Image: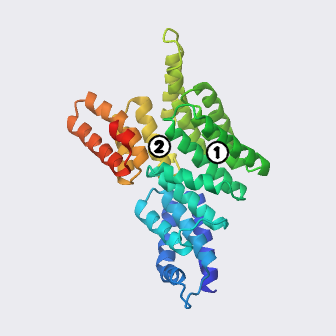
Amino acid sequence: MSNEEILIALSSQIEALQQEFDMKESIKLDSHVWNWFFEEIINVICESATKSVNMVSLMQYLNIRSSLYLNLMETIPLRGTLALFDRIIHGQIDKHPLVIRHFIIESSFDIRQGRINIAENILKRIIQYDISPLDKIDACFLLSEINMRKCNNMFPDRGLQYLCEALGEAERIGYKEKILCVYENLGFALMKDYPALSYSMLYKAQVLAEKMKSKYHEYSCKIYRARSSISMIFKCNKNNKAPSLFREDAENIINGIDRNDIPCEYMKVFYDETRGFVLDDVESLEKAYDYFVTHNAYAETFELSAQLFYKEYCLQRYSKAEEIISISLGIANNLGDKLWIKS
């Protein structure tokens, strides 16, 4: 086999392992590929005559590698891989499918790092192109997430419009997993203002996930449903029995999940965060917070810090509370976000 054929075959294996949530084997195989082909990547960047694989194959591999480390929230290898891709294309956006996919991955990373304005500008430009339905759906998901963050999770009119666009594309091509994802995202978008509708959307998504035997989405929907139940408490008349029933439902959902059965690390952290929120479990909140901090997930760190600071302060753990505020202020300063700094 030629180097070209080997790279294509191994890239496909890494992608397949990711889809099976076998991240350990994905990392192991990627490490071999990276060490083997790093010189080839440099040759392509330098436009060397000695290269033995073409640019398209390397771009495909770099996108698969970027997705791997984005899912693992491993900042250093992700940033380096994205930078190499940018060097190949000289930082220019064009309509090539691999370039579009690269900028969708990079925008997702920018959102996680708190650079939402940069991500929004790129994504709005991308969706104006004649791109594939899958790329358009993913871009709409990210634009909806940006709108949610800008609205501080209040009802996002424009964010909802992006999700409706995504649903239209998913139904047009009959892609069941993306249809499921739209209902899941709608459930999250509606959670604060319309928690009952949110709960209904999430339950529908969960049923679809169970039919498709998708453990990832099944657990994701369950965890979001627990959050919707808590949101419904705040919409209830405090004099009736509904709040206690909703809290009981949320607790039953969370207690019914075995953390060890959750298929990927990031979803486990999402579970820890929600468990802390629902069961008032400070240890779980700390576990999620520490993960976000060590993986440079700036937006998630800041959003969780206010809740955790309050709980640590109430427990009179003043040094821990002060540490949380210091980390959050540093993140806000680094991002130049005056609203966060003021907060």
State the separation of the CA atoms marked 1 and 2.
17 Å
Residues 6 and 337: in front is: 337
Residues 234 and 209: in front is: 234
- Residue 178 higher or lower than 192, as above or below: below
Is residue 288 rendered to the left or right of residue 59? left
Q: Residue at x 44, y 64 (%)?
A: 79
- Helix, strand or loop under label 1: helix
Q: Residue at x 67, y 43 (%)?
A: 180
Is residue 130 rendered to the left or right of residue 4? right
Q: Residue furthest top?
A: 239
Upstream in sequence: badge 1 or badge 2: 1
Q: Quadrant of residue 157?
A: top right
Residue 238, numbered circle = none
Q: Residues within 10 Å of mark 1 (few under 14, many from 20)?
A: many
Amino acid at pointer 2: Phe
Can you identify the residue that label 1 sits on? 181
Q: Position of residue 338 (x, y in %)?
A: 37, 42
Residues 38 and 146: in front is: 146
